[in-house]
Image (cartoon, grey):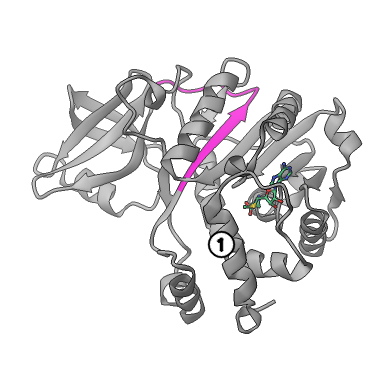
Amino acid sequence: MNWTQLDWKCLDRLRGTFLAGSPTEEAYWQSPSDLANYDLTFGERIGWKWDAVLDELELRGWRPPAGPVLDWGCGSGVAGRRVLRRFGASSFGSIAFWDRSALATDFAHDATQREFPGLDVSTATPGYLRSQEPIGLLLISHVLNELPPSAMEEIRSLVVRSRSVVWTEPGTREVSRALGALRDAWAPEVPVVAPCTHAHSCPVLAAGNERHWCHFFGFPPPGVLADSDWVKFAQRAGIDLRSLPYSFLALDRSWKAPTHLSRVIGRPEHFKPYARLLNCDASGLAELSVMKRGNPALFKELDKSKRPLVYAWTRQGEVITGGSHVAP
Ligand SMILES: C[S@@+](CC[C@H](N)C(=O)[O-])C[C@H]1O[C@@H](n2cnc3c(N)ncnc32)[C@H](O)[C@@H]1O
């Protein structure tokens, strides 16, 4: 599949389904070609969000455990392949894919086996999903708003068997807050690696913070904004390529969280004399400011940085007086 072979009828139909964003009875993949179209376009864009999530996890010092990987609700298998590329196939013994659509599971399996010929790649069976076999890393991506309660039960039982979980979703208010509620339910059992820098209840979900949601922005790879194929695709699909909002949750049973860090939520806003940002840390959510005059380098970094905004601040009340970005 390449850009000259795109099937717009198929992409328009898929986009309509994703925008509807509600549980559907029917699997919407109609042919392997649907998945190939998705993988080159919408799926690749989701891959950029995974790149940002994996950047942050590496920044925090997290490495995946060396057990089997399961990509649940895999679609074309973007999440699994992104993780394998980042950490190397040899970091994991095997990867299994599962989707309610056999077309999707087969596509993800074949694409992954082609890219990682030596790896043990399989399609998960219903028996495996019901079993108690340990899972090293459970991957879930862009599926939350499609799930009926029965599927959420299945995911809960998989989390119980998993050493670590990485779940990436769009950065919309509704989906992010739903993921936050799952985070609060699981955090007492499985420590949170990110986005949180603390183990307390999610402050975004506390009374009075209804207007907030935990989300971040990724960046497309260099060259994409000037690539005529991507520009044409984005125009036709009604997507702003410069904006890549996502939410995510990473859990790991062996994680020991450092407690002095802060995570900037969303994007800092820059005004002439100062920048304002929403900060999350162990003391909760706070709107903080950075004065340009006192901290010109930090002021600029908060505007330009493409790294996940995880900092150790020095503060006087609501004013940040200095900060060092977390390095891996
Ligand atoms: C928007 S696609 C995302 C695919 C892929 N995870 C990604 O991030 O590119 C959602 C996927 O979830 C699958 N799905 C939806 N409901 C499901 C369920 N109840 N059980 C398993 N898979 C499901 C769909 O078939 C589809 O492949």
User: In this orientation, which residue lies closer to the viewer: 33 or 268?
Assistant: 33
Query: Residue under circle 1?
Result: 15
Is 247 in the magenta?
A: yes
Span colored in magenta: 246-259
Locate residue 136: give its quadrant. top right
Which residue is outermost to the right?
A: 127
Residue type, mark 1 in image: Arg
Which residue is outermost to the bottom?
A: 4
Q: Position of residue 189 (x, y in %)?
A: 63, 16
Q: Is mark 1 within 8 Å of ligand 1?
A: no
User: In this orientation, which residue lies closer to the viewer: 184 or 217?
Assistant: 184
Q: Is residue 319 left or right of residue 53?
A: left
Q: Residue at the location (54% across, 29% down)? A: 193
Mark 1 is surrounded, within 10 Å at the Cα level, by few (under 14), some (14 to 19) or many (20 or more) other residues, namely some
Q: Position of residue 147 (x, y in %)?
A: 65, 39
Q: Is residue 130 left or right of residue 108?
A: right
Looking at the image, residue 312 lies above or below residue 276: above
Can you see residue 51? no
Q: Residue at the location (78% across, 32% down)? A: 135
Tag 1 secondary structure: helix
